[in-house]
Image (cartoon, helix red, strand yellow):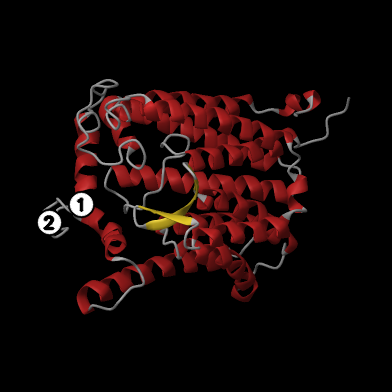
Amino acid sequence: MIEKKLLKNLDWVFLLAVIAILIMSALVLASASSSVVPDDPYYYARKHLLYIATGLGLMFFAAGFNYVQLARMQRFLYVLNLLFLGAVLVPGVGKVSNGAQSWIGIGSFTLQPSEFAKVFLIITFAQFLVSRQGRLNTFKDLIPCFLYVAGPLVLIFAQPDLGTSLVFIAIMFGMMLVAGANPKILALLFFGGIFLIVAVLWLHFHLKVPIPLEDYQIMRLVVFLDPYADGKNGLGAGYNIIQSLVAVGSGGFWGKGLFKGTQGQYNFLPYHHTDFIFSIIGEELGFVGGMLLLILYFILLYRALRIAMQAKDLYGVLLVTGVVSMLTFHILENIGMAIGMMPITGIPLPLFSYGGSNMWANLLALGIILSVNLRRQVIPF
């Protein structure tokens, strides 16, 4: 429970931005998923509302929990994170979906541990960085940080889940930068990593140098550069991007209206209620709808950063920074993927794409931000 005296600190703008995004997502998801199960048009919409309701419960529970106590649970949560991610790889326990063994199934109920792993990483890595405060100046100082993140990251990559692996890296860099790591070293590592990826891909395509990725994953990384050069004249790996661009482009300024799009309603665009939900926003709500969502995301992230600046300790600052880094990467990658500017990674749009694990993990993370916000100062009786 949240103490009444703490509500004086509540950032209502932040909370209202969350609620507004969720309301918008419920409306768009109802339209986007109406053709997925023709005999039950609102099947996914009802489940989405259930995920939102239970997720809000998680958010308020996290908000009522004193975030300072999380620091004392660092080791336990880190080991628990490794156990959950490792369980996914156990035959008979983990379930395969879209080429990745990322799910744990219990009867008809399925859970994606990698979604919660991001939140666990933020909680545990924040305390790890606090313990190394003032010792992040050289590359040697940063090695323990890389090794700390490498544990869960390797297990994620083994699924294989390239998209979530990239989210882990974004969280790590964002939190290390705010924790005081040498920005020159981080910039060198960031741009050096991009150069290395480009070089490896060039060697693979021109000199047949093998890469420890499946062929479909490699194609997803590069096909956005030219969707028609997928070896099948746009009917292979480039098909999703092409249909997504058609959807976004056809929406124009005002959009065609909810339930009136063609790419989603007639199932031309695959995964239009999950990975490519923004394409439906572009088609049915147009430029105006897309901009409205971006404004809401901007308000959410801006207020979160404001909460970070008002936090009473470095641990609180790093918790909020980690969540902001995670959400920002998700938003940029998902929307960039929908408009053909980023590789296809299967990363969902926060608070919008259909999926229980992602919705619960995101709202849990936002609840942690609210916990930091509510406890930014001691409120006298």
Q: CA distance from mark 1 to mark 2?
A: 8 Å
Q: Amino acid at mark 2?
A: Lys
Viewport quadrant of the N terminus = top right
Q: Secondary structure at mark 1?
A: loop
Mark 2 lies on residue: 232
On the image, which quarter does residue 264 sit in? top left
- Which residue is pictured at 29% across the width and 36% down the height? 279
Contact between marks 1 and 2 (CB within 8 A): the answer is yes
Query: At which x and y percent is residue 231?
Result: 13, 60
- 255 vs 191, left or right, is left
* Residue 231 visible in the picture: yes
Q: Earlier along the polypeptide chain: callout 1 or callout 2?
A: 2
Depth check, front residue: 277 or 113: 113
Q: Amino acid at mark 1?
A: Gly
Depicted 207 relative to depicted 242: above or below? below
Give the quadrant of the C terminus. top right
* Image: 270 above or below 95: above
Q: Residue at x 59, y 74 (%)?
A: 139
Front residue of 76/189: it is 76
Q: Callout 2: helix, strand or loop?
A: loop
Residue ID at (50%, 42%): 357
Q: Is residue 292 visible?
A: no
Relative to residue 275, is residue 142 drawn left or right? right
Rendering coords of residue 295 (x, y %): 44, 30
Q: Which residue is denoted by mark 1 in the rendering?
A: 238
Q: Position of residue 358 (x, y in %)?
A: 49, 42
Q: Which mark is residue 379?
A: none
Image-based side of 249 in relation to 375, left or right: left
The quarter holding residue 66 reads top right
- How dense is the environment of label 1, judged by Cα within 10 Å: few (below 14), some, or many (20 and up)? many
User: Is 122 drawn above or below residue 147 in the view shown?
Assistant: above
